[in-house]
Amino acid sequence: MTEIATKPLFQRLALVGAGLIGSSIAHAARRGNLAGHIAITTRSPDTLKRVRELGFADSVHDDIASAVAGADLVILCVPVGACGRVAEAMKPHLAPGAIVSDVGSVKQAVIRDMLPHIPAEVHFVPGHPIAGTEHSGPDSGFAELFDGRWCILTPLPDGDANAAARLRAFWEAAGSTVTEMEAEHHDKVLAITSHLPHLIAYTIVGTAVDLEESTKNEVIKFSAGGFRDFTRIAASDPVMWRDVFLNNREAVLEMLQRFSEDLSYLQRAIRWGEGDKLEEMFTRTRAIRRGIIAAKQA
Amino acid sequence: MTEIATKPLFQRLALVGAGLIGSSIAHAARRGNLAGHIAITTRSPDTLKRVRELGFADSVHDDIASAVAGADLVILCVPVGACGRVAEAMKPHLAPGAIVSDVGSVKQAVIRDMLPHIPAEVHFVPGHPIAGTEHSGPDSGFAELFDGRWCILTPLPDGDANAAARLRAFWEAAGSTVTEMEAEHHDKVLAITSHLPHLIAYTIVGTAVDLEESTKNEVIKFSAGGFRDFTRIAASDPVMWRDVFLNNREAVLEMLQRFSEDLSYLQRAIRWGEGDKLEEMFTRTRAIRRGIIAAKQA
């Protein structure tokens, strides 16, 4: 999928956070020789210890200062709600000319929180790889996570074009197809393609959990009837998703309103036995699956 | 997975309908030598023609009378709304002692519609294999569909125990694990494990389709963020699912009400920035995925 660069794209890659995404970036960078040195720092001592054991970083740091010092690429791989705090903490230690990026599922809030802490001589290029699994933590990362997946960059209007191009090259070498869009548009598109689906999945799994104990066991037993497709995404990292909903509130609430109206329409059709409305709706939705298969995102 | 019987369990298996489930039963029966003869009838001339071309039946019938004549096992593999009509049509042609079953995702309505047309000397044992894919039609069937999946039988309280045991043996030989429950309980359990998830998936995919053209393309492009998990089940057969919702109305509406309350709770938590409530809910739902993986239904 990817060629191995003969010369690393970056001298020193610093990753803040080593969950699914952070550890996968480390593996992908190692696979493609994308960084001369991979430094990792995380806040949790347990995660730090585990990263040391797994050995996918060249250096593991319990302080952010020593991790980002001298790095020409710093990527924040933390829940979006933590980005502002991390940016503030690392601000005095960033090297001039460094590129700072992130992997958050929300872009406007991350820009709002991080931008005030980005030094003038540092280039901030927000990013979001559209890839993941329901697993989390440093053990869940793997080099192939980004292969064939989209990575969206939302460069700032007055940002450095060369920095954006270098970050694009990094993600492409990590296996992704890179596209750019405005942060506001990103947040709307992701609200419908990712945030709302997760909210719905969390809700329906929660509804099932709340049913009495006997039915709950049967929910697991007979989950092949459709339910299990929801449980996978409802097993995603709780803190990451809490922060997504808190930080993309307007777009999520708008999509949720549309969804609720559509659900009420079908609910009414069921109550009144209007089979034609149900069949018409169910027929229209088939086409979009074919589109996804054609786009090789299935 | 299954042993090949040296002697077929049934002399003549008649399948009414040759969609995903009907054709998969034919393949599974062939694989396991479960029937001496496999007869298929369907209402659509195109499907009949295709079944002849695919060659997985011993005989293909354009009339239900000749298909079920002499059969000791008849399985209706049609949308649940069609079961009553089919039962009425085949009534005069059923052999004494035959077992009649179905594969419908709703059991109370199927019993209500079929039972009046079951002759006294024929044994009616309703059934429901919990297996499927998003594909439909005679080309989509395959012998392994039922392997390791549950099949629920809902025998009538005054039904013939021997007939239920013979049908159980058939499904077990087709690869399924068989369990029995009352029809009313079945319809409640399936409402939460299957019917509501499908309704939700159809709704969210429909909501996305209704967004303007540019966003729709991006919905496909960035579907790996969660949305694609919904599109698979929203590509399921529209007529089959229309009938499910029309025929399991009360249980679906009850589960939908619970779901809507839970969704409103999360919606309110997002609006008011109550991250603790979101995190608590998202943490609880993780456990159920682990249960599904442990139950080998993932």
Image (cartoon, coloured by chain):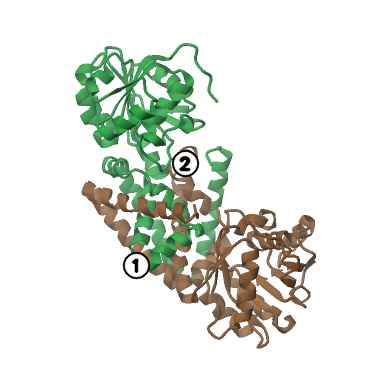
Chain colours: A green, B brown
Residue B117 vertical placement versus A268 (above, below)? below
- Quarter containing the N terminus of chain B: bottom right
- Which class describes the residues within 10 Å of circle 1: few (<14), some (14-19), or many (20+)? few
- Element under label 2? helix
**Residue A218, picture quadrant:** bottom left
How many discs appear? 2
Q: Nearer the viewer, residue B141 or A151?
A: B141
Q: Nearer the viewer, residue A200 or B45?
A: A200
Q: What's the residue at 24%, 18% (across, down)?
A: A66
Q: Which mark is residue B223?
A: 2
Q: Is residue B47 left or right of residue A61?
A: right
Three-letter amino acid code at disc 1? Glu
Q: Position of residue B74 (x, y in %)?
A: 69, 73
Q: What's the residue at 71%, 71% (across, down)?
A: B9
Q: Position of residue B249 (x, y in %)?
A: 45, 71
Residue for badge 1: A212
- Element under label 1? loop
